[in-house]
Amino acid sequence: MAVRAPTQTTGRATPGRTRPPDFFLIGVPRAATSSLYDALGRHEQIHVGSVKEACFTCPDIDPHTRHRTPTRFLNDRDEYLALFRKAADDDLIGEGCTYNIYSPAAPGLIRGLNADARLLVQLRDPVEQMYSNHGHKVLMGDLGADFGRVVDEQAAARRGRTSQPLSMADYDLRDKATVSPGLARFIADFGRKQLHVSLYDEYAADPQAVVRSILGFLGVATEDVPQPEVSVAHREARWRRLNRTMASPRLIERAKRATPAAFQPLARRVAATVFQRNRRRAVRPPMPVPVRDRLRAEFRPEVERLSELLGRDLAAIWWSRSAADEQHDQGSLGAE
C-alpha cells in the first residue's frame, strides 16, 4: 500500500512557524497512555497537541472509521502541524498516537518529520492488555461480554492467516496485544538511545517516578513533576441498549445523512456527551484462570521477544505476582 512521505524537517523551525513534534508517545493502547500524555502536557516546558490520537504518521493502517472514535487519522501535513501552533518557541512539542507502534510506515514517516525525535513507549502485559481492550470493546458494543468465548472465536478466525490485517479496523485483541514487531522497527530505525520504555505496572505503582524519568530523558526540568491522575477504573454502560444503539454504524451513517453539514460538529459533541454520561465505574471480575494461563502460554514468545529487545525479564515482572495482586490489578486498574 503506497503511503505519503512528509517533507524532511528536523530540529526547531523558524520562530512563529509551525514545527513538528520533538517527541512521540507511540504506544501502547490500554496502558494508561492518556493519563501519561495529560501529565506530560501539564509540564511548563512541554506543549502537547490538542488531539492526542492525531495519527498522521500511520496512514497505512487508517481504518476510515473517524465517526466512531476520537482518533483522527489526519492526511494533511498543514492540518497536523496546526495542532501544535500554540506552542511557544522554546516549548518541547509532544504527540500521542499510540497506533504508531503497529504501523510499518510510522518509523520512516516520523523520521521524515524529525530525525532527532524522542520516542516514548509504555508497555503492558499483553494478556492483561487484551482483557482491558476487550472491556473497552464491550462498552463500545463491538464484542460479546464473554472474554473466553471471544478469544476462542478470534483464534478460529485467525487460522490460516499469515500476516497482520492492513487496516486497524480489522485488528483483533491479539493484534493489539502484539507490539514486539513494531518496537523492533523503531529500535532499528532510531536506535535504542532515542527510545524510552516504561511499564504500566510501574506507572500504576508510582506515576510521578515514571514521569520524572521521562522528563529527564526529554531533557526538561524534573524538579516540579506534575501529579498524574491515573484514572484506570473499569467502566460499563448504564443502559446497554442505548449504548448498542449509539454505537451502531448504520444509525451513525443515517444520522450523518439527516443532519445538515453545519450542525454535524454540534451533533457529534452531543452524541459524545451522551455516550460518556452512559458510562459508570464497575468492578470487573478477574480474568478466568484457565483463560489467563492459556493466553500466557500463547504470548510467551511475544514477552520473550520484548524482554530481548529491552534487556529486562518481563515474564518475571508480569507473571510472577501473587494472585491477590493480579486480582487487584484487574479489578481496579483494568480498563483505561
Image (cartoon, rainbow, N blue to C red):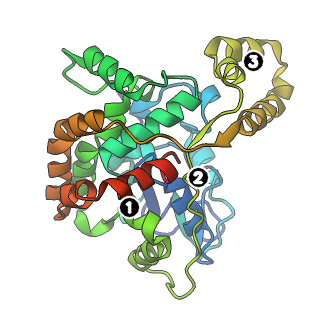
Camera-side mark, 3 or 2: 3
Residue 184 visible in this rendered orientation of the protein = yes
Which numbered dot is residue 71? none
The residue positioned 51% from the left and 85% from the top of the image is 221
Which numbered dot is residue 201? 1
Image position, residue 111 (x, y; %) = 35, 54
- Residue on which disc 3 sits: 256
Kindly indicate the quadrant of the structure image that contains residue 259.
top right
Q: How many numbered discs, if any?
A: 3
Camera-side mark, 1 or 2: 1
- Residue on which disc 2 sits: 81
Is 169 above or below relative to 9?
Answer: above
Among numbered discs 3 and 1, the one appearing first in the sequence: 1
Among numbered discs 1 and 2, the one appearing first in the sequence: 2
The residue positioned 20% from the left and 49% from the top of the image is 303
> 289 and 54: which one is in front?
289
> 103 and 113: which one is in front?
103
The type of residue carrying mark 3 is Lys
The type of residue carrying mark 2 is Leu
Distance (Cα) linking label 3 and label 1 = 41 Å
Residues marked 3 and 2 touching at CB (< 8 Å)? no
